[in-house]
Amino acid sequence: MGRYVIRRLLQMIPVFIGATLLIFLMVNVMGDPVAGLCGDRKCDPATATQLKKEFGLDKPVWQQYLTYMGNVFTGDFGTAFNGQKVTELMSAAFPVTIRLTVVAIVFEIVIGISLGVLTGLRRGRPVDTVVLLLTLVVISIPTFVTGLVLQLLLGVQWGVIKPSVSSEAPFNELLIPGLVLASVSLAYVTRLTRTSIAENRRADYVRTAVAKGLPRRRVITRHLLRNSLIPVVTFIGTDVGALMGGAIVTERIFNIHGVGFQLYQGILRQSTQTVVGFVTVLVLVFLVANLIVDLLYAVLDPRIRYA
Amino acid sequence: MRGATHAKWAACAVTVALAATACGGGGSDGGGGDGSGIVSSSWGDPQNPLEPANTNEVQGGKILDMVFRGLKRYDPKTGEAKDMIAESIDTKDAQNFTVKIKDNWKFSNGEKVTAKSFVDAWNYGANLKNNQKNAYFFGYIEGYDKVHPEKGDPSAQTLSGLKVVDDKTFTVKLSQKFSTWPDTLGYPAFAPLPKAFYDDHQGWLSKPVGNGPYKVDSYTKGSKMSLRKWDGYPGDDKARNGGVDMKVYTDNNTAYTDLMAGNLDLVDDVPASQLKNAKNDLGDRYINTPAGIIQTLAFPFYDSKWNKDGMEKVRQGLSMAINREQITETIFQKTRTPASDWTSPVLGEKGGYKEGLCGDACDYDAAKAKKLVEEGGGIPGGTLKVTYNADTGSHKEWVDAVCNSINKALGKDKACVANPVGTFADFRSKASKQELDGAWRAGWQMDYPLIQNFLEPVYFTDAPSNDGKYSDKEFDKLVNEANGETDTNKAIGKFQDAEKILAKDMPAIPLWYQNGSAGYSDKVSDVSLNQFSVPVYNEIKVN
């Protein structure tokens, strides 16, 4: 197990370098970012040169990348064009997005798995059909439609929530955005759990457990659900990264100043430092989430061993 | 055990329910009509650090307008440059100026505003090593080429044309005659700065201190700034509300939704998609007033194909082929006015705006357009590419419409095609490096309400914003003469003569003047936009 973890950690290094290099090149290909700083007029050449020097944009790309990576290892993610440290932006944005992601994941786990278990146990019954239809509807509607409709209904028409989240973004204001963000994944979690439960229901170990005379509740939670969760956990694990990076749409609709907001702003202003910095952290989140998922397998199914 | 779990779930459900209702309550602070109410307003994240000489876009400009007052201020209604801190600005030769300032002005930290506060701030703004994006505003002052050389390091740290005479007086020597120079001093870049700015620069940036009607109460970069009325403000344009909370929105659609839900008092940029509903939704509380912004299509004069004889006919023909009336009505819901000169109606007749100066080249006439383009030798390459940035400002819609209009008028499917560029930065980079062929969208937002500002920076030979490299000796001569003219009326006449050369050469096709559009809630009143389409915050009353 220990060796497995170390090997996985080592594997992360090339993935990490590759991903950051790609992002770095992509942002750099978009052209000269200083040109956009002066609005609809041309920056005067002397100031532009000076700015380029300050942001290190006057050097060749490979050199910029090396300096950048060198700095990253010392915890310096550079400065965004508005003069703020990227780490400062991160410390403002990540807590907000993490809260939003937590809300979304909780929704996925609580609603998704409960509905999945419910329908898996009652396959073919009316409740199963209804939930299946509902998840189909949710999957087929794009997030921004769900978001805008909920915002309009709950925020403007009925006044139940504020249409936009305040800058502090406390948990209670993130409930609806979190639900919107979770919606599609939630439907997938429901379907995955349902299939898995329905499949394992006829497994020998479940029959044994029932024959032993265990209470139904214990059979379901301890035996049936635990074994059925492997695909679900895999999905939720990778979803953590996807939710954090993919919150751009939801964050925009509800004006949440999280990672999506900063990335969007960074791309529009071609702020290499901001974009690369945030993506670097997101790549790390992805990698770690994947590792945790793999380690969780053994907890769920003791037959799985790591070598 | 089972019971306990049930209880836990019930508790959770209650918490969720309570939390949800908590989101519904609240609203903006009350305060009544006694001038202590707080206005909440939409805001965009400023692109640059908030320093007077480093702020060149509307979002940062809004804050400077609240926190700073300079020598002059543009009247929010007429646009006239009126003395604010300046007691007098005198000149005999349009080149040497003596500035006297009023006695009673202070910064909100108690420091006095003196002649030195101005001179130091201007020296700071002009100096190359401070990276100020508005440094060129000081370019007329003598010695600018020493502190801001085009290449290499500055050979002087201060502008030789600036001299402090005493606490209340300083003199300015310009490097050329510029009669309307005092009228440019309302631009925020010319604001005075307190000592704190130099002593603790980072600290100042995180909480700017100025001399305006508001002081910064708290500032969370990227999301919110709370401004509060400064009771010690000596000016006569004191704030009529208790303060303004600026809230950053990434998407002005969300800001508009917040306004509809009563969660926000003022949106100063109604999203294009909502323009149709705004009148219905807001009634009188929808503002749509002209601003000093003109949208044009510029041409590449650095490309010999566009710079040869006869091409002016092609450009005039293209201009005639654009149905401005129809486009402003259907796409912009009348938030744009068809342009017929190269300035803006906010200047007024007296300030140099002249309706119809462009002549019939700005009137839609398909048949004549086709004839002119053919006479001029046709569009180079047969197709006109119109480049724009697709990331902001919904430019796609109107560029497509302009191209359709041209194609229809010329009777060819491919006479004009749109050419989107991904980001504004990329677009600007291509434009400023002369990498664009065909035409491109060229907006111009005025820095100060002067006809000079609409012409010289954009069409003068090698001027900073002359991306198309248009050059005409006669035009340059007239602009120089106008700048040297001490009599304002005569100066404006010369500028208009210069503009007539633009009508002949058509270096850029005027499309339309842009309006500022805003909406506000019934909790506030006396909301208006100034000529820069920025709300006049200090006049807003909270009911």
Image (cartoon, coloured by chain):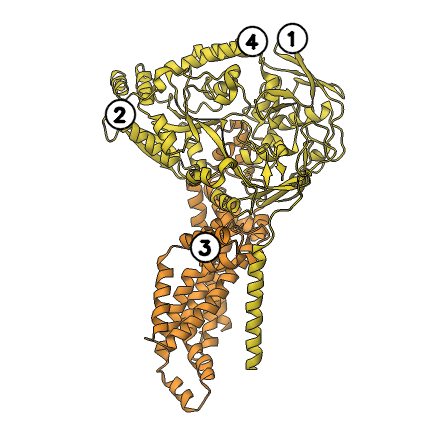
Chain colours: A orange, B yellow
Q: Secondary structure at mark 2?
A: helix
**Quarter residue B138 falls in:** top right
Vertical side of A258 occupied by A84: above or below: above
Kindly identify the amino acid type of the residue bearing the numbered disc 1.
Lys
**Sequence-wise first label, 2 or 1:** 1
Q: Give the numbered dot on residue B252.
A: none
Q: How far is disc 2 from disc 1 in space, using C-alphas?
A: 54 Å
Residue for point 46% across, 54% down = A153
Residue B184 point in image, percent of width and height: 59, 21
Which is more foreground, mark 2 or mark 3?
3
**Sequence-wise first label, 1 or 4:** 1
Kindly identify the amino acid type of the residue bearing the numbered disc 2.
Ala
Q: Give the numbered dot on residue B485.
A: 4
**Sequence-wise first label, 2 or 4:** 2
Q: How far is disc 1 from disc 4 in space, using C-alphas?
A: 11 Å
Q: Are marks 4 and 3 on the same chain?
A: no
**Crowd class of label 3 (few under 14; some 14 to 19; many from 20; radius 10 Å):** some
Residue B73 point in image, percent of width and height: 62, 24
Vertical side of B527 occupied by A96: above or below: below
Q: Are marks 2 and 1 on the same chain?
A: yes
Q: Secondary structure at mark 4?
A: loop
Kindly identify the amino acid type of the residue bearing the numbered disc 3.
Leu
**Crowd class of label 4 (few under 14; some 14 to 19; many from 20; radius 10 Å):** many
Q: Give the numbered dot on residue B409.
A: 2
Figure disc tally: 4
